[in-house]
Image: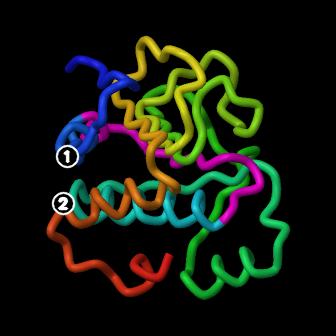
C-alpha cells in the first residue's frame, strides 16, 4: 500500500489506517511525552477504534509524566490506562502508532531508528517520512483529537460516552 503523503488532505482514511494496523502483533499507541488532553483523547480514541473494529488489543504508552491535576483527573474519570514507556517492548512484530507527535521530534519516546506503523498529527510535517505505512498529517486542524473524531464518525460506531467525553 502506498504511503499517504503528508501534503495531502487525508480525509476518509479510516479504511487505510485499519488496513495497515490489521496484522499480527501488539499495537503500542504513543502520544507525545507529558501528554496533554488532546494527546490523551487521541490515544484513547485510537485504542477504542482498533478494539472495536479490529478486535485488537492496544496499549497507550506514557513517556514522561502526567503532571497536571486536571489531566490526571481525566485519566481517572475516563479509565485511560497508561503503560510507562520503559515497560514497553519495542521489537519483533510490535506496531507503533504515534498520535499528536511525529518521528524525529524531541517530544516523544519513540526509540531511535524505529519506524512507526502510523502517524496521526495536527502539526505541520516535520520531515519526510519514507517507510511509514500510514500518515495523516493535517496542519489545518487545531487538534489531533478532531482527526480521530472524524475517524469515529466515519466508523459509524456508537461512540462510548467516555470516548465522546475525551
Q: Does the magenta portion include 28?
A: yes
Q: Is residue 70 above or below residue 93?
A: below
The residue range painted magenta reads 20-36
Q: Is residue 47 magenta?
A: no
Q: What is the distance, in whole Å, between disc 1 and disc 2 at their CAs?
A: 7 Å
Q: Which mark is residue 87?
A: none
On screen, 135 above or below 97?
Answer: above
- Does residue 19 appear left or right of residue 67 in this picture? left
- Write down the residue under mark 2: 154
Vertical relation: 56 (above or below) 124? below
Say which quarter of the image contains residue 120.
top left
Q: Nearer the viewer, residue 8 or 133?
A: 8
Q: Viewer-proximal residue, 57 or 109? A: 109
Ranked by sequence position, the earlier of labels 1 and 2 is: 1
- Residue 12's disc is 1
Q: Secondary structure at mark 2?
A: helix
Image side of residue 70 versus residue 153, left or right: right
Assess disc 1: are there few (<14), some (14-19) or many (≥20) residues with their C-alpha within 10 Å of its C-alpha. few
Q: Position of residue 156 (x, y in %)?
A: 15, 69
In the image: residue 144, left or right of residue 36? left
Q: Quadrant of the N terminus?
A: top left
Number of labelled discs?
2
**Residue plotted at (29% across, 59% down):** 150
Residue at the farthest front position: 140
Residue contact between numbered discs 1 and 2, judged by CB atoms under 8 Å = yes
Amino acid at each position: 500500500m502506498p504511503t499517504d503523503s503528508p501534503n495531502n488532505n487525508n480525509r476518509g482514511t479510516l479504511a487505510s489506517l485499519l488496513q495497515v494496523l490489521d496484522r499480527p502483533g501488539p499495537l503500542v499507541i504513543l502520544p507525545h511525552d507529558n501528554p496533554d488532553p488532546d494527546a490523551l483523547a487521541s490515544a484513547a480514541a485510537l485504542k477504542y477504534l482498533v478494539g472495536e473494529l479490529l478486535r485488537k488489543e492496544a496499549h497507550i504508552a506514557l513517556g514522561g509524566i502526567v503532571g497536571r491535576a486536571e489531566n490526571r483527573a481525566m485519566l481517572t474519570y475516563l479509565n485511560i490506562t497508561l503503560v510507562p514507556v520503559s515497560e514497553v517492548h519495542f521489537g519483533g512484530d510490535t506496531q507503533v502508532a504515534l498520535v499528536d507527535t511525529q518521528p524525529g521530534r524531541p517530544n516523544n519516546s519513540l526509540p531511535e531508528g524505529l519506524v512507526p506503523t502510523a502517524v496521526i498529527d495536527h502539526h505541520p510535517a516535520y520531515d519526510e517520512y519514507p517507510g511509514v505505512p500510514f500518515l495523516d498529517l493535517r496542519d489545518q486542524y487545531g487538534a489531533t483529537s478532531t482527526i480521530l473524531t472524524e475517524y469515529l464518525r466515519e466508523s459509524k460506531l456508537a461512540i462510548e460516552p467516555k470516548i465522546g467525553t475525551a
